[in-house]
Amino acid sequence: MIWTLIIVAGIITFMMRYSLIALIKPESLSPTTKKVLTYVPSAVFPAIIFPAVFLNKNQSFQFDTYEVYAFICALIVGYLTKNTILTIITGLVSYWIITFLL
């Protein structure tokens, strides 16, 4: 019974969010709205990444973790190359290297 409720709640949530995206025609949006929407990924991504990198289990800031060092490596590569895939790969590989070596 509980799994049925979870699946139904997931389907309802998905359909509500998807309907907002699927029903809007891009031609109906104003140029200002289109320009503002281009900033959404840049605003959401740091909000997702920041807690995972800088906050510990007690929700306090911690700057001497492996995640922070990998983040700094990825930040440098991202700034120099402007390549998203290379930045993600650099962050993952540097995290793995730091984790296994230290």
Image (spheres, rainbow, N blue to C red):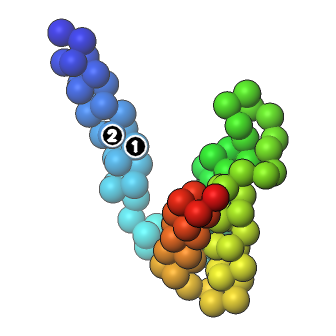
Q: Amino acid at mark 2?
A: Phe
Q: Amino acid at mark 1?
A: Arg
- Separation of marks 2 and 1 at Cα, in angstroms: 5 Å
> Residue 52 location, x and y as percent?
63, 46
Q: Residue at x 53, y 60 (%)?
A: 100
**For the residue labelled by badge 2, is the local secondary structure a helix, a strand or a loop?**
helix
> Residue 1 location, x and y as percent?
18, 9
Instruction: Answer with left or right where residue 28 lies relative to residue 18.
Output: right
Judge whether 80 appears above or below 70 on screen. below
Q: Residue furthest front?
A: 101
Judge whether 57 appears above or below 79 on screen. above
Q: Residue 59 bears which disc, if any?
A: none
Instruction: Answer with left or right where residue 32 lies relative to residue 92.
Output: right
Using the rendered image of the protein, determine whether residue 73 is visible from the camera's viewpoint. yes
Q: Residue at x 71, y 37 (%)?
A: 56
Residue 58 figure quarter: top right
Residue indicated by mark 1: 17
Residue 81 figure quarter: bottom right
Using the rendered image of the protein, determine whether residue 41 is visible from the camera's viewpoint. no
Judge whether 56 appears above or below 36 on screen. above
Residue indicated by mark 2: 14
Judge whether 96 appears above or below 61 on screen. below
> Residue 18 location, x and y as percent?
35, 48
**For the residue labelled by badge 1, is the local secondary structure a helix, a strand or a loop?**
helix
Q: Nearer the viewer, residue 77 or 27?
A: 77
**Mark 1 crowd level (few <14, some 14–19, many ≥20, 10 Å Cα):** few
Asked whether the beta carbons under mark 2 and mark 1 sit within 8 Å of each other, the answer is: yes
Image quadrant in which the C terminus is located: bottom right
